[in-house]
Amino acid sequence: MIYNIPYIAVAALILIGLYAVVFKRNLIKMVIGITLIESGVNLFLITLGYREGSIAPIYTSSPGGIMALPVPQALTLTSIVIGVAVLALMLSLVIHIYRHYGTLDARKIGGNEE
């Protein structure tokens, strides 16, 4: 059961992020939801590379144990860097939308006023 905790956390992060993107109408909350989904995916990648009793893959040869998989760690590091750039782009777009429309409500911006 203890091995499933990271996967439960991944599912919770992704579901909370999806809820924010689909059901919230504030653009900032939607950006936060996208960031939560990204964090869930990063946690999933790191969880895939975990091995019980492994050591960090910084040595060229394992001095007496198995090493953790380095590829998921490299992918996660790349994903974090790309995620920061995408977050900055999304927030700058939200600022421009707010300056142009005067609101962050997605319903009012799209022209579908209810």
Image (cartoon, rainbow, N blue to C red):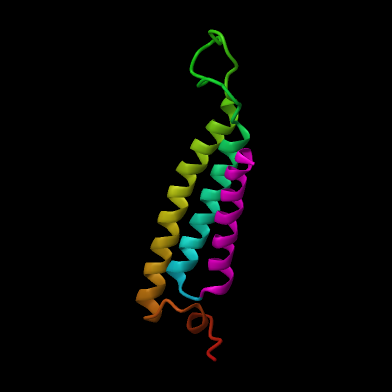
How many numbered discs, if any? 0
> Residue 79 in the image: x percent, y percent?
52, 42
Query: Residue at (63%, 43%) from the top-left corner?
Result: 4
Percent across and percent down for residue 52 are: 60, 26
84, above or below 113, in the image: above
Is residue 106 placed above or below 53 in the rendered structure?
Answer: below
Q: Is residue 82 part of the magenta span, yes or no?
A: no
Q: Point out the residue furthest to the front here.
A: 1
Above or below — where is 2 with respect to 91?
above
In the picture, measured across the screen, residue 52 lies left or right of residue 94, that is right
- Chain part drawn in magenta: 1-24
Between 9 and 110, which is closer to the camera in this rendering? 9
Front one among 96 and 28: 28
Q: Give the main secondary structure of the magenta stretch.
A: helix
Expressed as whole percent of the image width and height from the top left, the position of residue 22 reads 59, 70
- Position of 34 compared to 89: left or right? right
Q: Position of residue 113 (x, y in %)?
A: 53, 89
Residue at (38%, 75%) from the top-left corner?
98
Quadrant occupied by the C terminus = bottom right
Q: Quadrant of the N terminus?
A: top right
Please report the residue visible at 59 percent of the width from the left and 30 percent of the height from the top.
Answer: 50
Q: Nearer the viewer, residue 75 or 4?
A: 4
At x 57%, y 55%, the residue is 12
